[in-house]
Amino acid sequence: MAAINVRAVIDAGQVVASLGVRIPAATTAEDVRDPSRHKVVVKKGTRHRAQVEAIVTAGVQSCAAAGAHRPRTVTGRLRK
């Protein structure tokens, strides 16, 4: 499964979509570490939905996520 780096969306200095809003449907593609203590906050392969608060509280700015989105065709139907 391919991973993407997910971070908050910021436009003109304003947070449009926080990291906590963007990651709940995804799974961690690698261990998520607290940036100040380098301690693992969430282990690889964990669903973010259950760990969003821990990720945000630790001050994580971005993380590698897998399975967050499935590509859609022009008609809007999910590809297999």
Image (cartoon, helix red, strand yellow):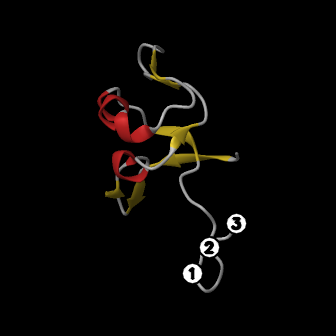
Q: 50 above or below 2?
A: above
Q: Which residue: 61% across, 36% down?
A: 29
Whole-percent x, y for residue 80 in the image: 70, 66
Amino acid, disc 2: Arg
Which of label 3 and label 2 is nearer to you?
3
The numbered disc on residue 37 is: none
Residue pointed to by mark 1:
76
Is the residue marked by circle 2 packed among few (<14), some (14-19), or many (20+) residues within 10 Å?
A: few
- For label 1, the SS is loop
Residue that label 3 marks: 80
Identify residue for label 2: 72
Q: Is residue 38 above or below residue 69?
A: above
Q: Left or right: 24 with respect to 43? A: left
Who is closer to the viewer here, 13 or 28? 28
Determine whether the residue tagged by mark 2 lies in a helix, strand or loop: loop
Query: Residue 11: horizontal and vertical position, in percent?
Result: 39, 63
Question: In the picture, which quadrant includes the N terminus?
Answer: top right
> Which quarter of the picture shows residue 55?
top left
State the SS at label 3. loop
Residue 43 lies, in percent from the top left, at 51, 23
Mark 3 and mark 2 residues within 8 Å of each other at the beta carbon: no
Does residue 41 appear left or right of residue 57 in this picture? right
- Residue occupying the far bottom of the picture: 75
Tell me the kind of residue under disc 3. Answer: Lys
